[in-house]
Image (cartoon, grey):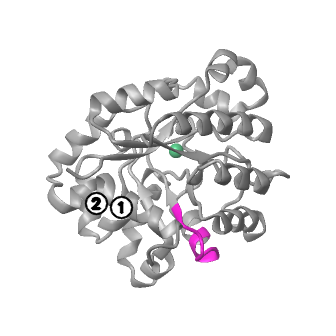
Amino acid sequence: MARRLDTHVHVYSPELIATWREVARVEPYFGRLASGKVHRWAEADDVLAAMEADGVDQSWICGFAFSDIGLCRAQNDYVIDAVARSEGRLQGLAVVPPLAPGAEAEIVRCREAGLIGVGEIFPQGQGVDLTDLRQTWRLVGACHEAGLFLLIHTAEPVGHDYPGKGDVGPREAAQFCANHPEAVVIFAHWGGGLWLYELMPEMARILRNAWYDTAATPFLYGAPVFSSALAAGVRNKILLGTDFPILGRHRYDAMLDAAGVDGEAREALEGGNGARLLRICRGEEER
Ligand SMILES: [Zn+2]
């Protein structure tokens, strides 16, 4: 049996959960998400318990990407510790405010502590313009140098609104890829639909370094989004991420079954693609 990964999981330290209302006063974007009606809290032990129940072999966990670097550092410390205690069941991402002094040093610190990526970055929530090279080059350079991938929140430019949706979608994500061919980047939530444009030959070239995760799919799309993406030829660029704790793995298993995704395609989405992404970050495989 192939390994089952979940590449998009949120965790919160017990201290943050206990003090979130005070934190929300100085971090309004966090406050909006944390008081949204689908929001849930989870500590690392909750992730491990759900993985046990759902048959998930490894989860990639991240803290909340605050605007304040001190709050980010505290979440990173929690993630580093949880990963170290997990016997390989958890891998971790670092959060940083991309424009803050000290962000690059924090990325290096987290890499040295064993984390594998940076994210989930919230372009709107953290006030960074994804299309502006002057705002992104330091972040991308630090990740590239450290061999880390980026996970960036993106959303659909159409459809219903929800807390945290934001105004950053396929257009901005595509410009980011054009600006940064060296980046290894996962766009969350299907890149807001960006994968569809890989059917345009020139966009397939520009998007060579783009990956897409499936986080929040049950809230956004019907099951055929999976078979549609496979038909569009992006099978090797889709990562199964749930957005736990707001959604559990069983919802995705049911959608994949309904979409008739099985065999090699299913293994690629559920684990093979994530493993390949890490080999690319380590320089062991060509992208
Ligand atoms: Zn997101």
Residues drawn in magenta: 176-185
What's under tag 2, amino acid-wise?
Ala
Relative to 275, is 72 above or below? above
Q: Nearer the viewer, residue 122 or 48?
A: 48
| Crowdedness near tag 2: few (<14), some (14–19) or many (≥20) residues, C-alpha within 10 Å | many
Picture coordinates of residue 29 (x, y %)? 68, 35
Q: Nearer the viewer, residue 81 or 145?
A: 81
User: Residue drawn 41% across and 71% down?
Assistant: 197
The residue under label 2 is: 268
Q: Nearer the viewer, residue 194 or 255?
A: 255
Residue 14: which quarter of the image?
A: top right
Look at the image and tell me whether residue 63 can be seen. Answer: no
Look at the image and tell me whether residue 271 can be seen. Answer: yes
Picture coordinates of residue 279 (x, y %)? 45, 66
Picture coordinates of residue 37 (x, y %)? 49, 23
What distance separates the C-alpha of mark 1 from that of mark 2? 5 Å
Q: Nearer the viewer, residue 26 or 280?
A: 280
Mark 1 or 2, nearer chain start: 2
| Crowdedness near tag 1: few (<14), some (14–19) or many (≥20) residues, C-alpha within 10 Å | many
Relative to 176, is 70 above or below? above
The residue under label 1 is: 273
User: Residue drawn 15% across and 45% down?
Assistant: 258
Picture coordinates of residue 194 (x, y %)? 44, 64
Left or right for 118, reference 191: right
